[in-house]
Image (cartoon, rainbow, N blue to C red):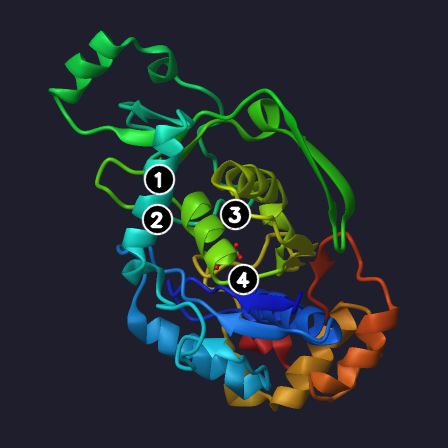
Amino acid sequence: MAEKGRFAPSPSGRMHLGNLFSCLLAWLDARAAGGTVLLRIEDLDRGRCREEHARQAAEDLRWLGLDWDEGYEAGGGEGPYLQSRRTELYEAAFQRLREAGLVYPCWCSRSQRLAASAPHLGEHRDKGACPCRAFTEEERGLHASQRPPAWKAAVPHRSVAFTDLFQGPQSFDLAEDCGDFVVRRSDGIFGYQLAVTVDDALMGVTRVVRGRDLLDSAARQIWLMESLGFPPPRYGHVPLLLSADGRRLSKRDRDLDVGLLRAEKRPEEVVGWLGTMAGLCPPGTACTASELLPAFRTHELPRTDIYVPRMGGYEEMMP
Ligand code: GLU
């Protein structure tokens, strides 16, 4: 089967160095496997996402020298490539889960707010079953007459094992490590886990490469894939980039964004800098992404998170 990787940015702000790092590695992984790449925009969280950020993300990836064969601004394949335009597909998958008795209505107010975005490290999400899972039909009817429910996946007590492309063998107990999670919020917005699973399956993605903080999401997504009758892709979780004080770089903290980088550096310098962090080239290298391919094929990536090393002028560029 033809291999296919993907970039899946959320347009909630300008991308930062950590986003570029994950995208570069996703591109290297797909190209090293002789595969294609697609670009999908994950804009379910309407409150935070803007299409101008999506256009900017595409432009920033192009500036770095990363290309894609299908997707946002490229067309082809199984679009549309903006999640906000794929509601009908999520609805169909949700109905299948509902018919299979794998989701239940939930009226708890916690846990819903962030369900449309990926659960990055350090974000506290509700874990586990809530009282609503055990409600009788009568109790459900009573609550439903007051306000619309969110819907949660009822995960079984079962382990999901897979071999991560970069982190090696993994095993998660769905109930203990992941817990029931929101697949549809009470306002009708579909959750990140369901949307990403449906998209990766329908778009024919075979290699999902992204930040290590989404490692346990892979267990949820594999379970959803199996429940919906799709073959799961391979997953590869790359180290996170950390600031000098040990924080994961994030858009919310306004960490070094690509706009600042572009004002000061050439794309080859940034690719070389990222390549050094991944152990693919010596410090001070300036190169294209393609020039990192031979090293990517033969070297193992570090498994632990990486402090961003100094590149000339880096400190001055921190906002
Ligand atoms: N859209 C998510 C993010 O930008 C990535 C989700 C994924 O790769 O599965 O954080």
| Gap in angstroms between the C-alphas marked 2 and 3 | 22 Å
In front: mark 1 or mark 3? 1
Q: Name the residue under label 2.
A: 90
| Gap in angstroms between the C-alphas marked 4 and 1 | 19 Å
Q: Pointer 3 and pointer 4: residues touching (CB < 8 Å)?
A: no
Is tag 3's residue or tag 4's residue first in the polypeptide sequence? 3
Is tag 2's residue or tag 3's residue first in the polypeptide sequence? 2
Q: Pointer 2 and pointer 4: residues touching (CB < 8 Å)?
A: no
Number of the label disc, if any, that sits on residue 204? 4
The quadrant of the picture occupied by the N terminus is bottom right
Quadrant housing residue 66: bottom right
Q: Is residue 120 positioned above or below 288 on the image?
A: above
Q: Is residue 268 positioned above or below 36 on the image?
A: below
What crowding class fits label 3: few (fewer than 14 Cα within 10 Å), some (14-19), or many (20 or more)?
Answer: some
Q: Residue 270, position in %: x, y?
A: 65, 82
Q: Name the residue under label 3.
A: 120
| Gap in angstroms between the C-alphas marked 1 and 2 | 6 Å
Q: What element carries label 1?
A: helix
Q: What residue type is labelled 3?
A: His
Q: Which amino acid does label 2 sit on?
A: Tyr
In front: mark 3 or mark 4? 4
**Residue in the foreground of this view, choosing between 109 and 68:** 68
The residue at 36%/47% (across/down) is 116
Q: Is mark 3 on a helix, strand or loop?
A: loop
In front: mark 2 or mark 3? 2
Is tag 4's residue or tag 1's residue first in the polypeptide sequence? 1
| Gap in angstroms between the C-alphas marked 1 and 3 | 23 Å
Decide if residue 265 is on the left or right side of residue 282.
Answer: left
